[in-house]
Image (cartoon, rainbow, N blue to C red):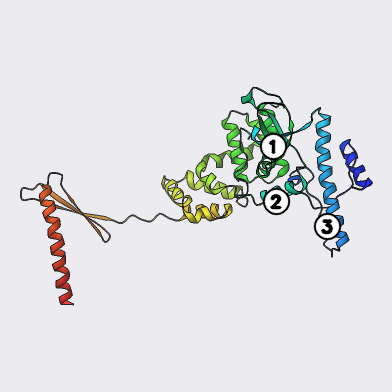
């Protein structure tokens, strides 16, 4: 690192200004405030320009780490390294993706941490289940940084974390604040996050603050989460391109249905074709399936065969080309066995006669 670069990092640590850096950022710093940078006009890159870009990217990552360090120091906290096995997830999930499944950027995050280390710490609190154990013992619960935690676990390394005693309300606000700054949670992930919080008894005002939404938008989020059964939401996944209007339309299909939608959705979401598709494609497949009118069941024609005394002997059901013969319960089993044998013989004679006529 040059003297100028080192000076910038020190200034960042103690509140100074940071010199502008290039637009390229490490995957794990894209979610931080100020992650959006103005577009730079394209131009032919020489080896020297490319090297300068890599240097600026390195400075940017160092600056982000310095900001995190500065904030921790200002709040009297310190960054520690924790075993990932001692950290539990938040009590409210905010993502439907699972590592690289439906999250194509996860592998890029893993490689970034493999090559450059973890630049930004996660936030955890002493686990309530562990009785508030300190940093040296017990378990912890993550407030934000779930993807970085999973990436560290994948790499088999300890994760850098800030340990802060948080109430449930403070954890929810911290988790929601990071989500708002990340701006990459899909509509349905935000809907489930809100629905879970309301279901756990959190005030709607706090939920609005955590998601940075108005009451009207919160109502729409809750409406969709309540209308679409969770098992089908889980099967679809985050569906980042399916926004509010399409999810509300899907919810309407479930709400206005007569129960047949559940059966059609269950059939669609358990197919191999559905499982192999991407999340947005899965949404569209289920949406199209629910819009498709149900096929009418074939008409069943029934004929009763009675005995000489008028009692029921058998029932013949015709459904399309299929024919079913059902005997009454009091019919002698020996008769049924004899008739079965006769059927084989008579059918063989019938086929022979038919072949002779042809």
Q: Quadrant of residue 153?
A: top right
Left or right: where does residue 19 sit relative to residue 105? Answer: right
Q: Mark 2 vs mark 3: which is more N-terminal?
A: 3
Label 1 element class:
strand
Q: Mark 1 vs mark 3: which is more N-terminal?
A: 3
Q: Residues within 10 Å of mark 2 (few under 14, many from 20)?
A: some
The residue drawn where x is 56% and y is 46% is: 248
The x and y percentages for residue 106 are 67, 48
Q: Residues within 10 Å of mark 1 (few under 14, many from 20)?
A: many
Residue 87 can be seen in this image = no
Mark 1 in CB contact with mark 3 (< 8 angstroms): no
Q: Residue furthest front?
A: 156
Q: Which residue is mark 3?
A: 40
Image mark count: 3
Q: Which residue is mark 1?
A: 144
Residue 298 can be seen in this image = yes
Q: Residue furthest left?
A: 308
Q: Residues within 10 Å of mark 3 (few under 14, many from 20)?
A: few
Which of discs 2 and 1 lies nearer the camera? The answer is 2
Which of discs 2 and 3 lies nearer the camera? The answer is 2
Label 3 element class:
loop
The residue drawn where x is 55% and y is 52% is: 283
The x and y percentages for residue 237 are 57, 47
Which of discs 1 and 3 lies nearer the camera? The answer is 1
- Residue 26, above or below 123: below
Q: Residue furthest top?
A: 131
Q: Which residue is mark 2?
A: 108
Q: Nearer the viewer, residue 330 or 264?
A: 330
Q: Mark 2 vs mark 1: which is more N-terminal?
A: 2
Q: Nearer the viewer, residue 351 or 318?
A: 351
The residue drawn where x is 15% and y is 47% is: 328
């Amino acid at each position: 690192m040059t003297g100028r670069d080192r000076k910038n990092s020190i200034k960042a640590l103690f509140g100074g200004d940071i010199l502008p850096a290039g637009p390229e950022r490490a995957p794990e710093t894209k979610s931080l405030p100020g992650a959006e940078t103005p577009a730079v006009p394209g131009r032919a890159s020489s080896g020297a320009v490319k090297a300068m870009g890599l240097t600026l990217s390195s400075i940017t990552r160092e600056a982000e780490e310095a900001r995190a360090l500065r904030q921790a120091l200002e709040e009297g906290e310190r960054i520690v390294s924790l075993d990932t096995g001692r950290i539990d997830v938040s009590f409210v999930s905010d993502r439907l993706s699972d590592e690289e499944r439906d999250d194509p950027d996860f592998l890029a995050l893993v490689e970034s941490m493999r090559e450059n280390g973890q630049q930004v710490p996660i936030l955890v609190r002493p686990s309530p289940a562990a009785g508030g154990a300190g940093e040296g013992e017990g378990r912890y619960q993550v407030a934000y940084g779930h993807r970085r935690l999973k990436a560290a676990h994948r790499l088999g390394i300890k994760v850098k974390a800030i340990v802060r005693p948080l109430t449930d309300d403070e954890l929810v606000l911290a988790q929601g604040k990071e989500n708002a700054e990340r701006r990459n949670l899909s509509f349905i992930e935000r809907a489930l996050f809100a629905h879970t919080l309301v279901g756990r008894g959190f005030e709607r005002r706090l939920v609005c603050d955590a998601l940075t939404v108005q009451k009207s938008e919160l109502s729409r989020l809750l409406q969709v989460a309540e209308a679409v059964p969770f098992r089908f939401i889980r099967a679809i996944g985050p569906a980042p391109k399916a926004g509010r209007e399409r999810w509300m339309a899907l919810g309407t299909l479930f709400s206005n249905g007569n129960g047949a939608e559940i059966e059609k959705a269950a059939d669609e979401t358990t197919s191999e074709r559905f499982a192999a598709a991407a999340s947005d494609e899965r949404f569209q497949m289920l949406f199209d399936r629910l819009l498709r009118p149900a096929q009418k069941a074939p008409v069943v024609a029934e004929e009763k065969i009675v005995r000489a005394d008028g009692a029921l002997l058998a029932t013949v059901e015709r459904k399309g080309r299929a024919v079913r013969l059902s005997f009454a319960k009091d019919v002698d089993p020996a008769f049924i066995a004899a008739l079965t044998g006769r059927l084989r013989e008579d059918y063989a004679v019938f086929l022979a006669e038919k072949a002779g006529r042809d």
